Amino acid sequence: MPNLKIAILSYRSAPFGGGQGVYVHDISKALTERGHKVDIISGPPYPKVPEGVNLIKLPGLDLFQTFSFKERIKIFKNKKKKNILDYFEFCSVLLGGFPEMKTFGHRCHNYLIQNTDYDTVIDNQSLSYGMLEIQKMFPFIEIIHHPITKDYKHDLLANNKLLYRLSRYRWYSFLNMQKRVAPKIKNIITPSSNSSQDIAIDFRCNESNITVIHNGLDVNIFVPYEDIRRDPFKLITTASADVPLKGLDYTLTALSILKNEFQNMNLTVIGKLKKDGHTSRLIEKLGISDSIVFKTNLTKKEIAEEYAKSSVAIVSSLYEGFGYPVIEAMSCSTPLIAANTSSIPELVGNYATLIPPKDSTSLANSIKLIINNYDKYKSISNKGRDHIIKNFNWLKITDEYEDSIYKAIDEHNKC
């Protein structure tokens, strides 16, 4: 098969926050190692770029680097050569919206009109109107990790107050665009069968246009690190504080239950604590602030080392299109407890303890069971690492991506 010039589009690609920056880094690295020439075309914040990959910056206003009104005004004033997209983005953010996907799509379309030498274009879940125009120009693939309708649903369930619900309605207004765009996309890749079903239902997409390809993991970084001593009472989870979808509340409540019996029990959260936010208030209410530490901006190796120090990993998410923390913990041979929901059972197989979502008591009891029978569950987690190596390695996954890319090129050429 010939080597290709590939553009990977990403409306925002923070290297440490969330999975988007991780995804574009890993898939671009994997395709580059196959001999393809890869450009990442990204809005801010920009990704960490692997060796051999070219980063093309399409700067928007990046107004979400701050929540200060004065700072946002300053950012807008300092932007040189402002155009209509900048004015739209600024006004939309001030009115409580999230316009980055829409404006990024138009900026990409404008860029690609002038730069047409790509063999294929892959977009990382902007689902913006601009992508429909790009699809006419190039062999095109849309990556949908999961429909954001799920985030919206769980946000509304978390708070019944009218003002909160109105603010969420405004924030998620981009879903109207995504619901119009998604059914018109001819080639969609998603990382789990569960997400494929949800995309077909929530976005009304033809299932024949959706291909399931798991995300991959560097199993040479996420390793057990046997030279690091595990703290028998150290728990670890990954969660964006104050994001209801991640279910952090239930892990915190379980910790407060366990503290009655295990005084040394402690929790590391890979994520950032929002000052004076819901999670911060809950920690104070439960009286467990001395037993929790939040860590952010960690490299992959540093995250793997945190797993190596921990005796139990927890994924208490209410929904996961594809849970990176699930496969990270398993690759590190850390006994895992996860909510039995969405894509999680599909990922873990028989190598993790599954519990009902939103059930802090079951979570606390499962943690206690693992601690009291650690050799048994450590043996299971060792087999779990073999499961990850077999099913989530980049060699297998890159083969599947290349097949989808060449198929998209053939279909586009026929048209």
Image (cartoon, helix red, strand yellow):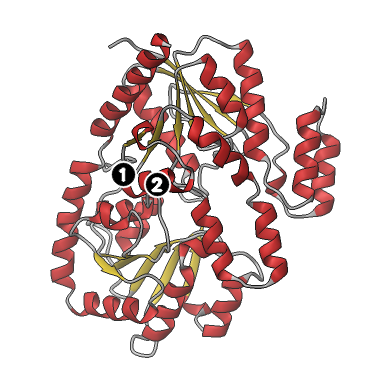
* Horizontal relation, residue 400 to residue 106: left or right: left
From the image, tell me which residue sits under label 1.
221
| Looking at the image, residue 365 lies above or below residue 119 | below
**Cβ–Cβ under 8 Å for marks 1 and 2:** yes
Q: Amino acid at mark 1?
A: Ile
Is 304 or 154 nearer to us in this picture? 154
Q: Which residue is the site of mark 2? A: 300
**Residue name at image x 75 percent, y 47 percent:** 93
Q: Residues within 10 Å of mark 2 (few under 14, many from 20)?
A: some
Out of 223 and 408, give the one closest to the viewer: 408
Which residue shows up at 50% across the image and 79% down it?
290
Please, which residue is most extreme toward the bottom here? Answer: 260
Instruction: List x then y, in percent, for residue 3.
Output: 35, 12
Q: Residue at x 41, y 73 (%)?
A: 358
Decide if residue 22 is in sight here: yes
- Answer left or right for 213 relative to 119: left
Total number of numbered labels? 2
Q: Which quarter of the rendered picture does the N terminus lie within?
A: top left
Residue 332 visible in the displayed image: no
How far from the left and from the top, in percent, is residue 47? 53, 36
Q: Which mark is residue 232?
A: none
Q: Quadrant of the C terminus?
A: top left
- Picture quarter containing residue 174? top right
* Rendered location of residue 24, percent (x, y): 46, 34
